[in-house]
Image: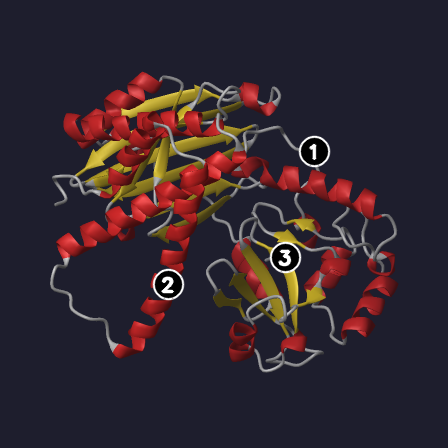
Amino acid sequence: MLDPKRFWAEWAESTGAMPGDPTSQLGQLQAMYMQLGQQAGTTGAEFGGMWPSEQGVTSEQMAAWEKKQGVKLPGLIREVFQQQNGGGVRDSEVLINALGGIQPIDTEMLSEELYEDEFPDTRLVFEFGSDGGEGIYLLDYNARGANGEPAVYLDIRDCGELDKVAGSVEKFFGKLLKSSDGAEVDWSEAGRLPVVAREQIDLTGHYHGVPASTDQILCRDDKALVLFARRQVGDEETLTRTVLPEPLSDCSIQSINPGQSNISTLNLQPRDSEGIVRIESTRTSTGRWKNRTSHGVPMYESIWSIDRERLKKLRAELLGTKRAARVEEEESTQQKFEEKLAALPPAAQRAALMQMAMQSQAESERLFQEQFPNIGAPPPEMAAMMQLMQGKLQEMQRRAQEEAAEHPVDPELRKLMDRMAKRFQPDEEEA
């Protein structure tokens, strides 16, 4: 059962963790909200402000919002907003807008067709919060009317996806905050499987003295790799178990915060991403566990290490010496290209990038023709669209040629560009 008094995440400054670390996201965003709220001053004061804050919203401010928007706030929202005006939801990545920031969707700025197909009256749909990433949560009053309980939708705008996630606000948060007595990830299983590699890192220095660490164990189970990970930051703990079917399509090595950290990552991306199964268990602030299982995502997992050479040896073991050498050569080429490109003036950089784009396009077309030599003419309904695309490509090629004439690429950079264009060629094992 939901406890409205334990609804909001603690309002704290950022822990200073590395970018991309989900454990620091709420702290970072709430610190940003505090700054934005101070800058906004009295903007939206009649509703308690436009940006989340620790100060609660009064009954009078909620009534003013309802009068302006013409809908009634859900009971749960009324209760928790009396404690705090929006912000991060405890034990989740969800961020709720301040009352003044809960606004009707703007169909002129967004995909009007997508919304009109789903909602009979778009004036009864309001932006409500976010999932901490690209997803936007919406409140939809269409089903039960302006005075009824709204349904909750998730709008992934970059992908044009719109999904109903719950029939009511209470059901949405009930599911979001559901917890169990124990973790579904069985850490002891890592000790029963053949171990391929293990990496343990003390991350305390990245969290301003807060005790933090990561422990990753890569195992093999039949024709798949299984990566176990334990991340601890202070009292927070997250366990994951990810099945990564072999073979792998990518094993690139990257640096985290170059110049600021000595940590590198080895990315493990299967060719069959649909076969990925990830179980995540996070210990909540009450000592219980939130468990969730996903299929096909994330598209890859990463092993962290302070020893880059050890990651290279692991890559060779996973890919084979020949493929690993090819991947390392590609990474070296990419680094040299980026260094030479950064040394050029902006106009010359643009010319080089346009030329490389055309080279990559030509290489892709050549490989496609080799793979499908007798594909024939496109169907009539696609012919016009393909002709339009071809016209745009020809215009890009013309501009690239003009740029190249004004800013010729030096021979060494051209060699690097040629090598990078050939990355489209399949491995011998894949051919």
Query: Quick check: can you spot residue 331?
Result: no
The amino acid marked with disc number 1 is Glu
Q: Position of residue 212 (x, y in %)?
A: 52, 24
Mark 3: few, some, or many residues within 10 Å (few <14, many ≥20)? many
Pointers 2 and 1 in contact (C-beta within 8 Å): no
SS under mark 2: helix
- How busy is the neighbourhood of tag 2: few (under 14 within 10 Å), some, or many (20 plus)? few
The Cα–Cα distance between marks 2 and 3, rounded to whole angstroms, is: 41 Å
Question: For the residues marked 2 and 1, what is the alpha-carbon distance in whole angstroms?
Answer: 52 Å
Marks 1 and 3, how far apart at CA: 20 Å
Q: Which mark is residue 391?
A: 2
Q: Is residue 405 visible?
A: yes
Q: Position of residue 265 (x, y in %)?
A: 38, 28
- Measured along the vertical axis of the image, is residue 243 above or below residue 307? below
Quarter containing the C terminus: top left
**341 vs 9: above or below:** above
- Please give the label number shown on residue 129: 3
In which quarter of the view is residue 253 placed? top left
Which percent across, then down, holds residue 191?
27, 28
Between label 2 and label 3, give the one nearer the viewer.
2
Which amino acid type corresponds to the residue marked 3 in the rendered image? Answer: Gly
